[in-house]
Amino acid sequence: MSDAPYLTSPRRRGPRNGVRAVAAVAVVLAIAAGGSYAAGLGPFARGEDGPDPAAMEQARAFLADWSAGRLPDAAGRTTRPGPAEEVLQSFTAGLDIEKPKLTAAKGAKEAEDGTLGVPFTARMPISGLGTWTYESELPLREQDGAWKVDWRLSLVHPRLSDTEKFRLERAETTPPKVTDREGTSLNGARYPSLAPLLGRLAGDSGGGGPRGSVELVDRASGESVRTEASFGKKPDPATADRPVRTTLDATWQSAAEQALEKADGKNAALVALRVDNGEVLAFANSPSSGFNRAASGTYAPGSTWKIVTSSALLLKGAVAPDDVVDCPKYLTVGKEFHNVETSEHPGATFRKDFMESCNTAFISLRGKLDEGELGEVARTYFGVGQEWHVGIPTYDGSVPVPKDETEKAASMIGQGRIQANPLIMASVTATAVSGEFHQPSVTTGTSGKTDGTRTEPLPGKVVGQLRGMMRDTVTDGTARVLADLPGEVGAKTGTAEVSDDQDNNGWLVAHRGNVAVAVVVEEGVTGGGSAGPVVHSLLSAVPEDPS
């Protein structure tokens, strides 16, 4: 990377009176054009508390273009577009920077050279290592009646110059072995869904993950002048050869991988975890490479969320399982809601509504809950929306307060802006049937720790009611696909709308013995028809209870 200084021509002396005349004309023209520099006011006009809004707008636009990767546009906002684009491109590509985030800060001030300095924070995510964060400053200058970023290398980073540049160095690392709970080796070849996670599991648990640094180096010699940022932990020699043990179970993981073949090539995800302590037995994704839908996906949970809605209603005695709550085909609340296949169950009990997943019945009970009550129950009893520390990156759910009555109706059936994933819904299921939230964990170091999550136990009466309704859903409701499995299986199906031009996502959550399972199949149409066979395959291939 390089940047040549500006080229300037020597000034010729003219008659002194000519200089005065030109200066006077310049002042008049500057004032007439609204300029401030020639008038001696700089970027801060007299009586103003802050910098010229047009200057700040240009600074923010430059940072926004740089952040978004619109480098030609960013360069075009500078006094030297050609060199600017070249440097911005080489800086980003050379350091493997992905999606930088650049934010203007307060405290703009006028410099001695007449420019306006706008401080900003740069957060530079370096692929596979971490985020390099530093502070810098944008100089802005008026040019041809408009504000421009006064291009110089130091605005990219204060230490970037004609004599020094940055170099990314990655350390050669051999990640430690990762095993299941019994010491069985786990590898990406045999368990494809784990391949994207093994490096993270090893890194978080044993310091054996990716390591590297950003070095400031001399352009001429290539020698390092200083280390600007370091990433990763150096492995402890005493534990370097020690395998990293997880909560996973090789038998369950293998069965989960095979079970997703029942998703017929659709995008899908599965989580199985222990009810008594939240330890994850299996993560599986289809496709197995890339994004971990099981733990980081953001989906409307559909009718599986009726477990939480039912809990909120039962907790305050707003309804009982055998109360009559009619289930019509349609119900209008700002828009028309209907049941799957526009089914209806006149005179149905609340238990029947749960078993048949009646949307209209649940929506008709929305007045029984306060505006933010569903989210409060989700957070207080199920830990949804709190910060989880599982051992791998996760999305921990969101239950916003409804904006209006229509959104409140949608939230009763797991739609609207409610967001979850199979990890969250497996945990919700485990909490519902045990009465106690256990933060899910996949590494032994996090097992049993709450790390700031605060929940309350569900009353035993509510737990008994939920277990009964989930069991009835298997024997006589929408989860009859699981009815032939051994053991006492309880479940809840879900169908979640995505958009007008996409088929619905299919969901199913279930529990048997000490295990809770959740599956989502994108565009699976119905929960029982798409996610049901996946859960059936899993539970058919494993013991009734894990060891």
Image: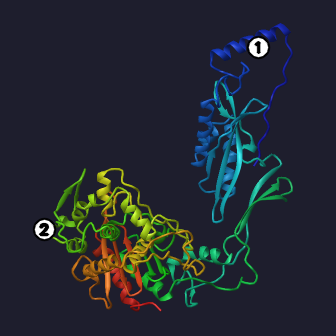
Q: Earlier in the sequence, mark 2 or mark 1?
A: 1
Of 118 and 459, which appears nearest the observer?
A: 459
Characterize the local packing of mark 2: few (<14), some (14-19) or many (20 or more) Cα atoms within 10 angstroms: few
Residue 257 in percent (x, y) is at: 44, 81
Residue 522 in percent (x, y) is at: 37, 67
Residue 484 in percent (x, y) is at: 27, 88
Q: Is residue 137 left or right of residue 33?
A: right
Of 1 and 397, which appears nearest the observer?
A: 397
Q: Is residue 142 depicted above or below 406 in this figure?
A: above
Q: Secondary structure at mark 2?
A: loop
Amino acid marked by disc 1: Ala
What residue did someone put label 2 on?
346
For residue 177, what is the image quadrant?
Answer: bottom right
Q: Is residue 109 depicted above or below 256 in this figure?
A: above
Amino acid marked by disc 2: Pro
Residue found at the far top of this picture: 17
Of 329 and 319, which appears nearest the observer?
A: 319
What residue did someone put label 1 on?
23
Residue shown at 70% from the left, 52% from the top? 134
Q: Is residue 24 visible?
A: yes
Q: Is residue 413 left or right of residue 200?
A: left
Residue 284 in percent (x, y) is at: 46, 77
Residue shown at 70% from the left, 85% from the top? 241
Instruction: Measure how far apart labels 2 and 1 are at the Cα level.
Output: 90 Å
